[in-house]
Image (tube, rainbow, N blue to C red):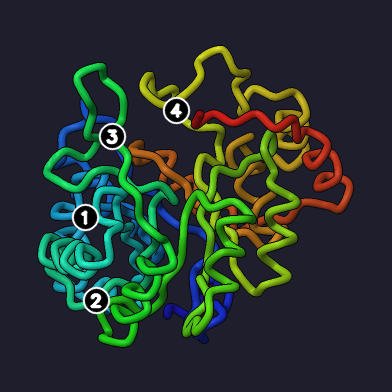
């Protein structure tokens, strides 16, 4: 890893950069943009790239990483790449083929981190969101402990350096942690986390088990019509955040990102705007005071944008 990169050590000895670049984009954004912005993010200093099969752009993101390796900007080992196992592939026999498909799309030999995207299985097949004739999601019954055992095998086979989970609550994490014959603990749990939903209980539980919390939606999320409740307050317009931002001569977005870092949370900054991508790197250049941290803690109101 790049020595400039601020990293946290994972429970398996690997290191994860504390600031990550999120690559999810709504459907209306052309796939070619994922290629451009990922290259740009690497150019301005991002070393942690977060993607997923669900985002349907791993081909472009992989191309961006490979082109930055080819032009000498980075080596493969400088990049920390995360992919996610989608819910239609949670049956044990589908896990490794799903990872291999991601690797093929990326044209990479391994991912640095492979995580279970959601702790709920959907009916296997071509559809990402299989629905019945009434438009209801069709679920599948899978024991996540069996899914986890195959992830452990993928780690042993060198297809993924580290393995973890996403969107798991404490009970679901405990189910894996208490699994008889557990070989590897999840290194992380990636969840929605921001000043309005600071996840402090889950964070304490994860820390006590040496699991890193990774925050997505850290800026309160874009208003994606299918996912996000539009009636919720806009995080980056919060008066407390804005006042702290003014005091530090930073943007409210940078304050929200910095807040996570100082709690020992890995934070994903997602933007397809080059000016903001560059600006997000400045989060490494300043520090919040204990009073700032306390004031931001006080904003927690259990507002979940991704319902």
Which label number is shown at residue 122? none
Q: Is 261 left or right of 176, judged from the image as shown?
A: right
41 left or right, relative to 269 = left
User: Helix, strand or loop at disc 4?
Assistant: loop
Q: Which circle, 2 or 3, is nearer the viewer?
A: 3
Q: Which mark is residue 61?
A: 1
Confirm or deny contact between disc 3 and disc 4 (CB under 8 A): no
State the CA–CA distance, disc 2 to disc 3. 31 Å
Q: In this view, does 280 lie above or below 19?
A: above
Q: Across the whole image, how many numbered discs are drawn on residues?
A: 4
State how far apart marks 1 and 4 are (Cα).
21 Å
Which residue corresponds to mark 3? 138
The numbered mark, 4 or 2, whose residue comes first in the sequence reads: 2
Residue at the location (36% across, 22% down)?
226
- Which residue, as the protein is rendered here, is positioned at the far top? 231
Quote the CA–CA distance across marks 3 and 4: 27 Å
Viewer-side residue, 163 vs 283: 163
Sequence-first disc among 3 and 4: 3
* 167 relative position to 62: left or right: right
* CA separation in Å, label 1 and label 3: 30 Å
Of circles 3 and 4, the one toward us is: 3
Residue 110 is labelled as 2
Tell me the residue at 25%/55% (across/down).
Answer: 89
Give the residue at mark 4: 222
Query: In which image quadrant can residue 224 be found?
Result: top left
Q: Nearer the viewer, mark 4 or mark 2?
A: 2
Residue 67 visible in the current orientation: no
For marks 1 and 3, the one nearer the N-term is 1
Q: Position of residue 72 (x, y in %)?
A: 21, 75
* Residues at discs 1 and 3 in contact (Cβ within 8 Å): no
- Tag 1 secondary structure: helix
């Amino acid at each position: 890893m790049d020595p400039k990169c601020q990293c946290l050590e994972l429970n398996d000895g690997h290191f994860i950069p504390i600031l990550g670049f999120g690559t999810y984009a709504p459907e209306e954004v052309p796939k070619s943009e994922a290629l451009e912005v990922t290259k740009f993010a690497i150019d301005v200093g991002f070393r942690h790239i977060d993607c997923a099969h669900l985002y349907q752009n791993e081909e472009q993101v992989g191309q961006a990483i490979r082109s930055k390796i080819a032009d000498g900007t980075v080596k493969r080992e400088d990049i920390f790449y995360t992919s996610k196992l989608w819910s239609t592939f949670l049956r044990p026999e589908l896990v490794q083929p799903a990872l291999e498909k991601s690797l093929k799309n990326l044209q990479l030999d391994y991912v640095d981190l492979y995580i279970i995207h959601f702790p709920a299985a959907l009916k296997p097949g071509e559809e990402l969101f299989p629905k019945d004739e009434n438009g209801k999601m069709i679920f599948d019954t899978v024991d996540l402990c069996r899914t986890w055992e195959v992830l452990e095998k993928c780690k042993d086979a060198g297809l993924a350096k580290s393995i973890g989970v996403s969107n798991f609550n404490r009970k679901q994490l405990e189910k894996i942690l208490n699994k008889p014959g557990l070989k590897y603990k999840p290194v992380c749990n990636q969840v929605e986390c921001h000043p309005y939903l600071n996840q402090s209980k889950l964070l304490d539980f994860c820390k006590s088990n040496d699991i890193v919390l990774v925050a997505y939606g850290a800026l309160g999320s874009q208003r994606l019509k299918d996912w996000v409740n539009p009636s919720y307050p806009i995080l980056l317009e919060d008066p407390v955040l804005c006042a702290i931002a003014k005091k530090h001569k930073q943007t409210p977005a940078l304050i929200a990102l910095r807040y996570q870092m100082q709690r020992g949370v890995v934070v994903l900054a997602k933007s397809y705007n080059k000016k903001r991508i560059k600006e997000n790197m400045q989060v490494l250049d300043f520090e919040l005071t204990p009073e700032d941290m306390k004031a931001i803690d006080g904003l927690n109101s259990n507002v979940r944008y991704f319902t």
